[in-house]
Amino acid sequence: MLTVDEALARLLDGVRLADGEEVGLAAALGRVPAEPHVAAPIDVPPFANSAMDGYALRAADGGTPRRVVGESRAGGPRAAAVEPGTAVRIMTGAPMPDGTDTVVPIEEAEERAGMVTLATTPSPGAHRRPAGLDVRRGELVPLPRSPITPSGIGLLAAMGIARIEVRRRPRVAILSTGDELRDPGSSLGHGEIYDANAPALAAAVIEAGAEPIMLERARDEPDLIEARVREGADQADLLIVSGGVSVGDHDHVRGVIERLGALDFWRIAVQPGKPLAFGRVGETPVIGLPGNPVSALVTFELFVRPMLRAMVGLTGDGRLRVPVRVSEAISKDPARRAYLRVLVERDFDGYRGTSAGGQGSSQLLPLASANALLIVPEGVPATEPGRSYEALLLGGMT
């Protein structure tokens, strides 16, 4: 069996970067920029403006009273120019009138009968924001190698940029296999269960920033599976097949991958999720995930999520890892690295974790209740109470 690290290295080797596409700002949230920077077409702000409500004036006139000759407000008409002994009433964000270099806040001034008296002598340049304070025209503004945030969209909009080049979302075909599977909401017959993997994996694909393509479910018949695999490989950047990758008489996925393309590996020393197949059909990578829903979702987290991020130029899995102290012994297979479902909370000296419930690969409730995967290395039969282990956080903490 390959180690987790060996398997991940093979999966990431040869990942192809997705093409770029141009989108409007409304569709840019969460997308990854295709270019490292963008040239600012204008100054931001585009003109010198006031940081306060108050009076725009010449600091050189000192603290003497001034005649108010007009008003400058955001989006209003151009205010009168200020000459010695005059001032303009000004609002936050409004353009600085010609001849002014300073703003005195309204709290430090008193206006009566068209004259404004200052409480203190103004400091030159006070409360004045120069043009280009944030960004200068022509400046190469770096775009982080991370999904675009609301503040990033705000910056682009402030520069007048309406469209941005981003990496195309990877298309991920999802195929569930199994004679026993039925759609949620339908009636169950003898020995039948609802297909949890297809909707769960589609949600995981979306959360990872990719686009799911749902293939028609296939029964455990080689010809049907082969037809679906061909279809998925033709449509997608990555094909995920759940179920049928182990050694049972009705597990046909590995054989189909070998017939249509090439199989790289199919077993990993990981718990849960040992039977995981990886190969290619044509140019399309194919990952066969275990049929048990917990195994499918955990191995997606460990192996598929980093692949999808690599396709858009990101590294790692994007998850925070923290040291977590456990208070109980949770059993595991000593031959495999385990990813145990736990609840992590902060306490006075760091993080503590408790088992979210049963650790069986078919038990979805503990995984749905967990907010982290506790990583316990090979060679360890159980967690040691009081010891800290690295945990991969899946969500927030209460």
Image: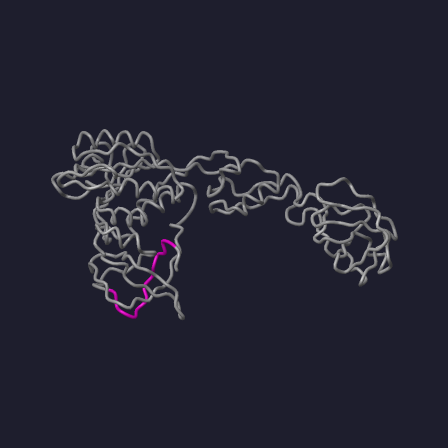
In this view, the residue in front, 291 or 15, is 291
Q: Is residue 269 left or right of residue 29?
A: left
Farthest front residue? 113
Q: Is residue 306 left or right of residue 118?
A: left
In this view, the residue in front, 16 or 116, is 116
Q: In this view, does 325 lie to the left or right of 169?
A: left
Q: In this view, does 274 lie to the left or right of 70?
A: left
The C terminus sits in image quarter = bottom left
Identify the residue shown where x is 19% and y is 40%.
244
Identify the residue shown where x is 81% and y is 46%.
70
Location of residue 85 in the rendering, given as x and y in whole percent from the top left corner: 88, 53
Location of residue 121 in the rendering, given as x and y in whole percent from the top left corner: 81, 62
Location of residue 62 in the rendering, given as x and y in whole percent from the top left corner: 85, 59
Judging from the image, the colouring scheme is one colour
Q: Is residue 339 above or below residue 236?
A: below
Q: In this view, does 219 lie above or below 130?
A: above
What is the count of numbered marks? 0
In magenta segment, residue 393: yes
Which quadrant would residue 205 be assigned to in this image? top left
Identify the residue shown where x is 86% and y is 53%.
113
Farthest left residue? 249
In magenta segment, residue 233: no
Location of residue 3 in the rendering, given as x and y in whole percent from the top left corner: 26, 53
Query: Range of the magenta residues?
Result: 383-395
